[in-house]
């Protein structure tokens, strides 16, 4: 049974950006909660603010108004340094562009966030590599990998950090349909095994239907 106490709670969140004619509101009073073990799809047309919402949830950006609580942390009350430490320990983000470190091999990329947070688990890293089909790729560098393999490395890196909240921004957007389905299967299985909360941005109705719940962002509001 999923824990009913949210690990992510956004209340009355507003965010605007400067435009040619002044401030343009992107998020208009967002209320969103995600509990441990939940998988939530965040959908909406391009430019609707999905990535902005995700970045605010992950402490990469700040809200203009409203509150954002992540694992009992009020992000508005945290300094930049404390938000950075919070991202290392409680949150992991999977980006569409993979964001692997080209100078590190696969093994070191997977271990990177966990080592920074001070809780690298070599047994877990080896297990993730095996489950994601990366065991024979560990000494290779990102440039030698396919897109699907790079995304698997990004997923392994995120899970290896043992986050309470996992944020994914179009994690299969750069993959072909077959590879995307395989990577999504692997991601959901790993999330189910850890009990982390997953908030996943996607344009794909097929991917959205695989999540436990769907929130649609339109005109700056969730509907």
Image: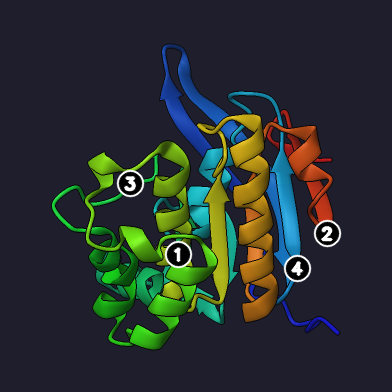
In front: label 3 or label 4 = 3
Instruction: Identify the residue at image location x=58%, y=24%.
Output: 47
Counting residues from the start of the chain, the first of labels 2 and 4 encountered is 4
Tell me the tag on residue 99: 3
Task: Say whether residue 147 is left or right of residue 24.
Answer: left
Marks 2 and 4 sit apart, C-alpha to C-alpha, by 7 Å
Marks 3 and 1 sit apart, C-alpha to C-alpha, by 13 Å
Counting from the top left corner in percent of width and height, residue 75 is at 46, 68
Instruction: Identify the residue at image location x=44%, y=53%.
Output: 62
As displayed, is residue 51 above or below residue 58?
Answer: above
Instruction: Identify the residue at image location x=50%, y=75%.
Output: 163
Q: How many C-alpha atoms fall within 10 Å of the one at disc 1: few (<14), some, or many (≥20)?
A: many
Task: Say whether residue 86 is left or right of residue 162.
Answer: left
**Quadrant into which the N terminus falls:** bottom right
Question: Among all residues in the image, which is located at the extreme front?
Answer: 136
Counting from the top left corner in percent of width and height, residue 199 is at 65, 56
Q: Give the image quarter of residue 194.
A: bottom right
Question: SS at mark 1?
Answer: helix
Q: Are marks 2 and 4 in contact (CB under 8 Å)?
A: yes
Question: SS at mark 3?
Answer: loop
Q: Does residue 85 appear in the picture of this structure?
A: yes
Residue named by callout 2: 212
Residue named by callout 4: 38
Residue named by callout 1: 156
Q: Are marks 2 and 3 in contact (CB under 8 Å)?
A: no
Identify which residue, 216 or 17, lies in the foreground: 216
């Amino acid at each position: 049974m999923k824990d009913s106490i949210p690990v992510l709670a956004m209340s009355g969140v507003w965010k605007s950006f400067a435009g040619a004619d002044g401030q343009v509101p992107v998020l208009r009073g967002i209320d969103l909660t995600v509990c441990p073990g939940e998988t939530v799809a965040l959908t909406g047309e391009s430019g609707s603010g999905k990535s902005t919402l995700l970045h605010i949830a992950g402490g990469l950006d700040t809200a203009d108004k409203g509150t954002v609580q992540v694992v009992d942390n009020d992000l508005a009350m945290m300094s930049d340094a404390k938000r950075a430490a919070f991202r290392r320990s409680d949150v992991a983000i999977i980006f569409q562009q993979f964001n692997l470190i080209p100078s590190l091999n696969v093994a070191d990329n997977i271990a990177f966030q966990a080592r920074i947070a001070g809780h690298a688990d070599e047994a877990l890293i080896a297990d993730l590599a095996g489950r994601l089909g990366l065991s024979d790729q560990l000494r290779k560098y990102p440039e030698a990998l396919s897109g699907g393999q790079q995304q698997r490395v990004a997923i392994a890196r995120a899970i290896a950090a043992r986050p309470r909240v996992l944020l994914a921004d179009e994690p299969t957007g750069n993959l072909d349909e077959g590879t995307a389905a395989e990577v999504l299967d692997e991601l959901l299985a790993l999330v189910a095994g850890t009990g982390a909360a997953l908030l996943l941005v996607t344009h794909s109705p097929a991917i959205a239907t695989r999540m436990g719940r769907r929130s649609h962002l339109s005109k700056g509001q969730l509907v």
